[in-house]
Image: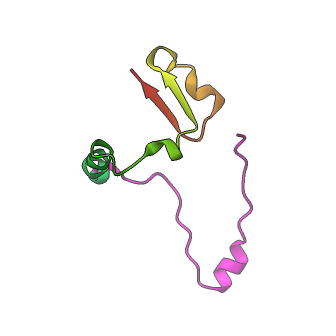
Amino acid sequence: MQREDVAIPVFAMYSRCCTFHTGRADVRPAIPTVLDLLATGRLDPSIVTTRTAAWDDSIDAPLDTPMKLVVTH
């Protein structure tokens, strides 16, 4: 999957008083909850995983820019 820039209608958003935030989220506070959901089977990460790689391949695995890479040991 190729990632490309996306056009954003900034003037239309401004006219409608829209606010757009982007960036990496601070997910640290949610990690214990997510791990619990995984451990109890209430969350299935396979629906968002686009590539799984072995630990030995973990250095090169991100080079093909998968949307969601999971490295296993």
Which color mode does the image show?
Answer: rainbow
Q: Please give left or right for residue 12 compared with residue 37 in the image.
A: right
Image position, residue 51 (x, y; %): 57, 32
Instruction: Please state, as top left, top right, bottom left or bottom right, where the N terminus lies in the image.
Output: top right
Image position, residue 13 (x, y; %): 66, 78
Residue occupying image coordinates x 52% and y 46%:
47
Residue occupying image coordinates x 49% and y 41%:
46
Q: Please give left or right for residue 46 compared with residue 10 in the image.
A: left
Q: Would you place residue 24 above or below residue 13 in this image?
A: above
> Which is more toward the observer, 16 or 3?
3
Residue occupying image coordinates x 69% and y 44%:
3
Q: Residue furthest front?
A: 41
Image position, residue 19 (x, y; %): 55, 75
Report if residue 19 lies within the magenta region: yes
User: What residue range appears in magenta?
Assistant: 1-28
Image position, residue 16 (x, y; %): 64, 85
Q: Count all numbered tags in the image, as a single digit.
A: 0
Dominant secondary-structure state across the stretch colored magenta: loop
Report if residue 14 lies within the magenta region: yes
